[in-house]
Image: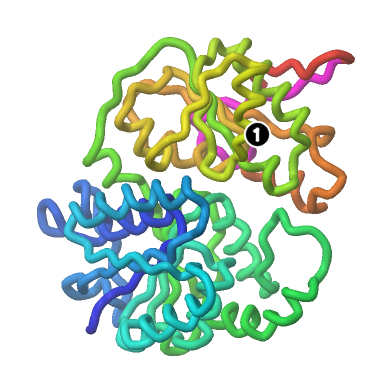
Amino acid sequence: MTGQLAFVESPVQLLNVLEWAHARTPSGPPGTAGGGTPAPTPAPGTASDTTPAPLTVVVLSPTDPMSRGQLRRMAQLARDEGLTVHWQEARGGRGALVRTLRRLAGPLRSAERVIIGDPFSRYVQLLLTLFGPRHLTVVDDGTATMEFAAQLGRGERLVRWHRKGGLGPRELVLAPVTTLARRRLAPARGRTVEIFTSLPVEAPEGVEVTANAYAWTRARFGPPLLTGGADLVGTSLVETGVVDAGHYTRVVGELARTHGATRYFAHRRESAEKLHRIAVETGLQVVRPELPLELVARRGPIGRTIVSFPSTVVHTLPLALAGTGVKVAVCEVAPEWLRATASPRAQGFLSGVTGTAAHEVDRLTARRTPSVDRLGFG
């Protein structure tokens, strides 16, 4: 065994690589995984049936400043945990792709296991077409994990849920890469596939699904100091073209008034213009977190109620905040909030995220009135 290699492109991916490593590293009595939880029985011939191999994390750095800043801080946390972290400017101008492939060719060929966070990433798909790993693990990078598992199980091509329409010119050019990558992401003779997730996914045939309980996060941080009132969690649904900006801002204001919220935790992809509008029109304090929200909430201080739109946090925060007394609520997205350009799959996917939220999560339903969207517990 020559080692394990993880490719991450977002702070949440790196957090979940840390959770995966913690779950597979004995740190208690024999037969337990990190955090003292029962260790899963390893499949014969996989990397888990022996002492864990060294894990190296390669950060394929994005370009937006917020993601880069959070990734730098997450990279330091990973180094503090004993992982080797390499920062790769994979999108750093002309020639970056060739330089990245040249640097990663050797480690990829020799890696016993490859861990990825975004199977829809064109960069990751290209790497997988060049070097197929013997063992592959997919960790969460948001609710897209649910769509990945479903598409893999149905044998469909990999398409992000918020994308609309058929294949464009770029997709047509990359179609051979996507097709081969999809085969490399599926289990086959000589290759195992694992999905390490906190989300409710149905395991495709031959794929091992391992639960992410956020044991590392709970062991490393908290419990948090609780404040009065509520905190709101932002989303990038406006930026991805799914939700109308006017509806979104109006609902955020209504949620703040209904639940006594004072802070709005911005998604790292939210635009400065939208956040300024939210601050001015709602009076909320807009906070740009320096780490993934699971860590920010666990470190505290945090409100006794956290209100979110359909997103990964309605699944992850109840795990990260287990036993703290914090209540998590999810506000459904009403059909009239969607933009005309939204994918036809958007409403069904977002409803699925809300409907599969943990039992501890309260559902908020929208009751339409002529003047305003009233939101209450459903």
Q: Position of residue 97 (x, y in %)?
A: 50, 78
Mark yes or no: residue 36 visible: yes
Q: Which residues are magenta?
A: 354-369
Where residue 305 appears, as percent x and y from the top left, is 48, 20
Question: Horizontally, is 374 left or right of 259 in the view?
Answer: right
Decide whether residue 363 is among the magenta residues.
yes
Residue 347 position by quadrant: top right
Taking depth in this image into account, of 203 and 375 the one nearest to the observer is 375
Q: Residue drawn 41% across and 83% down?
A: 133
The residue under the point 21% across, 52% down is 34
The residue shown at (27%, 60%) is 21
Q: Is residue 7 above or below residue 140?
A: below
Look at the image and tell me in which quarter the N terminus lies.
bottom left
Q: Is residue 236 left or right of residue 288?
A: right
In-image side of 275 versus 43 (left or right): right
Q: Amino acid at mark 1?
A: Glu
Label 1 element class = helix
Say which residue label 1 marks.
273
